[in-house]
Amino acid sequence: MLKRQMLTIALLALVAVTGAFGSRAQPDRVIAQTNGPELAVYNQGIALVKDTRTLTLAKGVQPVTITDVAAQIDPTSVHFKSLTDPAGTAVLEQNFEYDLVGADKLLSKYVDQPIQLVTNDGATYEGALLNGSGDIILQDKDGQVLVINRGSVRDFTFPKLPEGLITRPSLVWLVDAQTAGEQQAEITYMTNGIGWQANYVLLLAQDDKTLDLNGWVTLDNRSGATYRDARLKLIAGDIHQASQAQPQRVFEVLKEAAAPTPQVAERGFFEYHLYEVQRPVTIKDRQTKQIEFVTAPAVPAEKFFVYDGAQDYRFWGQPQTDPGYGADTGVKQVRTMLQFSTGEQGVNAQLPKGVVRVYQADVDGSALLVGEDSIEHTPKAENVRLYIGDAFDIVGERVQTNFDRSGDKTIEESYEITVRNHKTEAVQVRVAEHLFRWSDWKITEESAEHTRLDAQTIEWRVDVPADGEAKVTYTVRYRW
């Protein structure tokens, strides 16, 4: 019933639109024909669309219409420029029309006007529409008022499409041309609803010492428009925006096969990096498209373990004098980390921010997911460190063994950290501690020499025997 009702409305609307635009098909109304757009997509959910259109203009003032623009266009960003005769072609005004046709819109436009409807039992009613929101209220030619339940209506019939309703969002310019003839015009605008991110697939060797990296551009388009044979550029970097784009959703995934030659060329642009696809790309509305943009085989990698028993405790700019602060965290998990370089001896490429998924082959050769993490924009010659999961057979334990506040401005605190290894081979674990009580601290006793990582963090690299344990003890003094 609903499908038939919608089909009837759509067909009637199409007839009305054909008639309306057919009657307006005069030389003074120009429909711009596209030559293929250029699309610059940012990884913040926005894109810059630049389109070159072919126009046949008459001399004088006339409207120019584009009907295949993005539904999420920012109307304030629209710019129209004649490439053929910029001095002789002036834009008097521009409008974004988005009052789209629909059953509710048609009913609201036809209040106090005659319509016809057919109910599920085949009865036909005609009359002036008094109300179309909720139940349908008609007044027939004799003045009788009829109330018809909206759910019982099978078909609506409207005489024509009301003025102002359109089937697609449209940009309309009022253009004054000094000379008649064919012109090339450049149209640019910003739109929301289209963005990209990088997705990386890492295949880790069975000895954990090398990895193969494949990077994919994942482009999500829900802007309300399809871009056919677009010249696609992707901007990696966080630009400042006066207003933020909306969150993204994924509809349909279309993965394109990797080509034997590079599909994407990278270059610097302003303070960002730009990736340009080396062939025209069609990006459908409500589609997620993936294109390979970086590959790197046999990249040196390092897997290591980290026990950070107070990972959620930090120095907040004032003395932390509560003895229980950070004392009993209950953290036992030892993190498995993976690190590689983006330098010449590594990936040898910049890596835009995105999600990294790490796989490793099982004994039968099938690749299994071992973990995933996200990275920020990473330039060349930097290290990428991934947290890919918690080690099953390695456990940490952190115990506060002493807390002494010997004066108003001095605290001494001691900890014992135990790492137990249930694996059949020895491992090295990096034990991290955060000195969070105050900025002025000193290690007065320790079982092994530490390494200072930053102003508040120290680390020990502890060798733990197979099926054994190792301990770290230390005392720290804070003064303020």
Image (tube, rainbow, N blue to C red):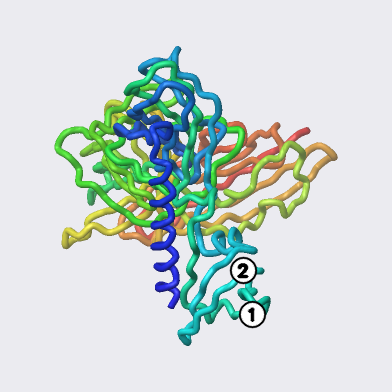
Task: Look at 30% across and 34% down and name the residue there.
Answer: 36
Q: Which quarter of the image is occupied by the C terminus?
A: top right
What residue type is disc 1 on?
A: Leu
Find the distance from the CA under tag 2 to the CA under tag 1. Answer: 10 Å
Task: Look at 51% across and 52% down and name the residue there.
Answer: 100
Q: Is residue 306 left or right of residue 329?
A: left
Give the answer, above or below, for where 322 lies relative to 46: below
What residue type is disc 2 on?
A: Leu
Query: Can you tell which quarter of the image residue 243 is in?
Result: top right
Give the x, y percent position of residue 176.
48, 22
Label 1: which residue? 146
Query: Can you tell which quarter of the image residue 252 is in?
Result: bottom left
Front residue of 71/39: it is 71
Give the x, y percent position of residue 362.
22, 60
Q: Is residue 352 left or right of residue 104?
A: left
Q: Nearer the N terminus, badge 2 or badge 1?
A: 2
Q: Secondary structure at mark 1?
A: strand
Q: Identify the residue at the far bottom of this view.
A: 121
Query: Can you tell which quarter of the image residue 86 is in?
Result: top left
Q: Identify the residue at the far right of this view.
A: 408
Give the x, y percent position of residue 22.
38, 46
The answer to whether mark 2 and mark 1 are in CB contact below 8 A is: no
Q: Secondary structure at mark 2?
A: strand
Give the answer, above or below, for where 214 lies relative to 236: below
Whether residue 195 appears in this view of the structure is no
Q: Which quarter of the image is occupied by the N terminus?
A: bottom left
Whether residue 105 appears in this view of the structure is yes
Label 2: which residue? 129
